[in-house]
Image (cartoon, rainbow, N blue to C red):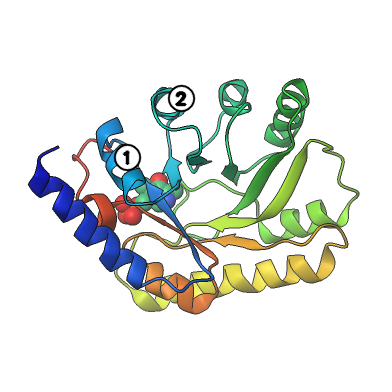
Amino acid sequence: MTEEERVELAARYQTVRSGIPAHVTLVAVSKTRSVEEVQALYELGHRAFGENYIQELCEKQSRLPADIEWHFIGHLQSNKVKQIAPFVHLIHGVDSIRLLDELDKRAAQVGRVLEVLLQVHIAQEDTKHGFSAEELLALVEAPWRWQHVRIRGLMGMATNTDDEAVVGMEFAVLAALFQQLRDRSGGPALDTLSMGMSGDAPLAIAAGSTLVRIGTAIFGERPAKAS
Ligand SMILES: *Cc1c(COP(=O)(O)O)cnc(C)c1O
């Protein structure tokens, strides 16, 4: 990175930071970004980073400071859980019972309790994974049988559209569901509602998000191949 790029990164980071209230966690989404770029943000004092791809996450984790909190925000396949179980801080997109079973098993093997967010299907697109509202309520009301997995809350993605009414409505649905789950789950308090990205973070925060996942607004546009 050039000195100029560092200065630009710092400026974008400060802008994003200053737009986020203190009670909302900022996860910097570093997918497709270099180790050097992550390190530069780390040196500005940032610790929470989000990645979508297991191989990229493991590679960065092994090369960057140990006190980084790594968030896995992509679609997690059961056969990849083993690789991140020893170090991952929070897994955002847990979307099936089968995955909970696998997380429990792998967490037990490494002597950890893994913290997770359950993914809710709110967007209109079929491609987005997640539980339905009914499935979620059933899940938290039944006895929790995964001793090495702790649910911290929900994660959701709105439809990719410029229509703020649609996005705002989807976030409101998610926030209401989060509240309902908190009311009904007798167990440990749910405290994390992960919703909002570069394009829709203000709407998400207004609707009650407690964690935003921001990539582009901090690091600049990603190369076109990234999703
Ligand atoms: C890439 C990604 C983000 C960040 O998106 P930006 O638009 O770059 O802020 C947030 N959440 C998920 C799940 C992502 O895949």
Tell me if residue 162 comes above or below residue 106 in the rendering: below
**Looking at the picture, does residue 175 appear above or below residue 68?**
below
The one of 104 and 139 positioned closer to us in this rendering: 104
**Rendering coords of residue 223 (x, y %):** 19, 39
65 on left or right of 97: left
Amino acid residing under circle 1: Val
Which residue is rendered at x = 38% and y = 47% of the image? 29
Q: Which residue is at a point 13% across and 47% down the rendered structure image?
A: 5
The residue depicted at 43 percent of the width and 33 percent of the height is 65
Residue under numbered circle 2: 58
Q: Nearer the viewer, residue 197 or 132?
A: 197
Q: Are marks 1 and 2 in contact (CB under 8 Å)?
A: no
Q: Position of residue 205 (x, y in %)?
A: 47, 73
Amino acid at circle 2? Cys
Residue visible at 14% across and 37% down in the picture:
1
Q: Position of residue 34 (x, y in %)?
A: 26, 33
**Residue 227 seen in this snapshot:** no
Determine the secondary structure under disc 2. helix
Q: Residues within 10 Å of mark 2 (few under 14, many from 20)?
A: some
Quadrant into which the C terminus falls: top left
In which quadrant of the rendered view does residue 152 lie? bottom right
* Towards the viewer: 223 or 152: 152
N-terminal-most mark, 1 or 2: 1
Which residue lies under the disc numbered 1? 38
Q: Which mark is residue 95?
A: none
Q: List the single residue furthest toward the right.
A: 143
